[in-house]
Image (spheres, grey):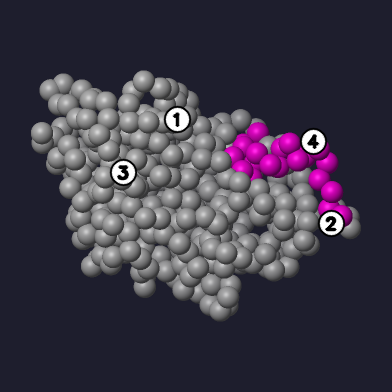
Amino acid sequence: MRRRLFAAATAALLLVSGAAGSAAANASADAISGRAAQAAAASVQVPAGVTAGVAVFDRQTGTFTEQLNTSARFRSASVVKLLLALDFLWNRGPDYTVPAADRARLEPMLRSSNDQAANHYWSALGGSAIINRMVGRLGLQDTAPPPAGYEGYWGYTSLSARDTVTIYRYLLDSAPGPVRDFVMGNLRQSTRCASDRFDQHFGIAGAFEKPWAVKQGWAGSSYPEGTCGTAAASRTAGSGAGTGTGTGTAPAPAAAAADVDLTRPALHSTGTVGAGDRSIVAVYTLQPVGTSYGKAYTDIGRLTRSLNVPGAARPAGWWYGTWSDHVNVRPDPSTGKSPITQLPAGAEVLIGCQARGEEVRVPPYTNDWWAYLPQYGGWISNIYVSSPDNKIPDVKEC
């Protein structure tokens, strides 16, 4: 039975790729065709309406494989937590012991982007002075503290893609072993659900197979609800992981500071990919005001998948759009068990295979086919997949 439910609203989220491993002709074809996902692109493909700063550095050859607006300054959102952690760990003695109380803060700050921990260190270690110290220590070129009037808001620290590469190169090549192991070890344990209930496995974490280590960032009033777990969590502009603060909820800025846009929704993905942390990847994006989290999640995923990342392994499967708010991901192809989590509304997902299961009804439509999502370890009804037929034409059966 063919389904055209909400066809107009979901046209932009139609199938974007077929079986992994084949090459797509270009970004437009990848967005609308059933052909296979591109294995490795030679240049960054930026979705329409998105502003991006991108750098990919191959540590094996010592060269950049991707560079786009690498010196452009973006508000860091939670990526600045890398600098907060490094400042705390700086000169802590020969063994760099992390006290239990600080470990209890730093681990969730790095793994789950916990804002309360960032608030603590921003206040305890001197706020903007942290950024000034780390700029000098690491030789950062574009990084700067929050602008005048917003000194309390650590998420307004500016960062660039090239400075982010410098931070990771310091961590991997110059930092004392205990510092490297502590920070990178926590980034390798990034949780899908962040502390503010956002699904933070976008960008790098969605585009590539492990091993990877990631520190993500997100901010903006266009992301009003939690998207991870089984219950939405309210979130206001300027709170949560992104434009967090040590002094309360950040007001909407009257104007952007100098060359840093503080108004458009931001979604960033940074980290390392491949065995031995071969590639350092930094992807900074700004979306048009009003962009939903699912759309931003999809856009940064498409951009990241277009990158030439040496050492990266790309997951097998088919990328498809979804529709509806908070689609439940189930442990098996039925509605009998509690959901594992929920998808960001309208997000694009990787489908590994499909199988028949419980019939799902969204009157007047019905569908008994289910899609397996390997990156979530669960199933969604095909009724929520943006495909014209109940059985997705090019996806294999489980």
User: Which one is nearer the viewer's eye here, 331 or 186?
Assistant: 331
Q: Name the mark nearer the viewer: 1 or 2.
A: 1
Q: Position of residue 296 (x, y in %)?
A: 37, 46
Q: Name the mark nearer the viewer: 3 or 2.
A: 3
Residue 348, by quadrant, is top left
Residue at 53% in and 61% down: 273
Q: Which residue is mark 2?
A: 91
User: CA–CA distance between discs 4 and 1?
Assistant: 31 Å
Q: Position of residue 148 (x, y in %)?
A: 60, 47
Marks 3 and 2 close (CB-CB < 8 Å): no
102 falls in the magenta region? yes
Label 4 packing within 10 angstroms: few (<14), some (14-19), many (20+): few
- The mark that comes first in sequence, 4 or 1, is 4
Q: Which kind of residue does numbered mark 4 sit on?
A: Ala
User: CA–CA distance between discs 3 and 4?
Assistant: 47 Å
Q: Which residue is mark 4?
A: 101
Q: Which residue is mark 1?
A: 340
Label 3 SS: loop
- The mark that comes first in sequence, 3 or 4, is 4
Q: Which kind of residue does numbered mark 1 sit on?
A: Ile
Q: Name the mark nearer the viewer: 4 or 2.
A: 4
Q: Which residue is mark 3?
A: 398
Q: Up-down: is 398 above or below 246?
A: below
Q: How many marks?
A: 4
Label 1 packing within 10 angstroms: few (<14), some (14-19), many (20+): some
The residues colored magenta run 95-116
Extreme-left residue of the structure? 1
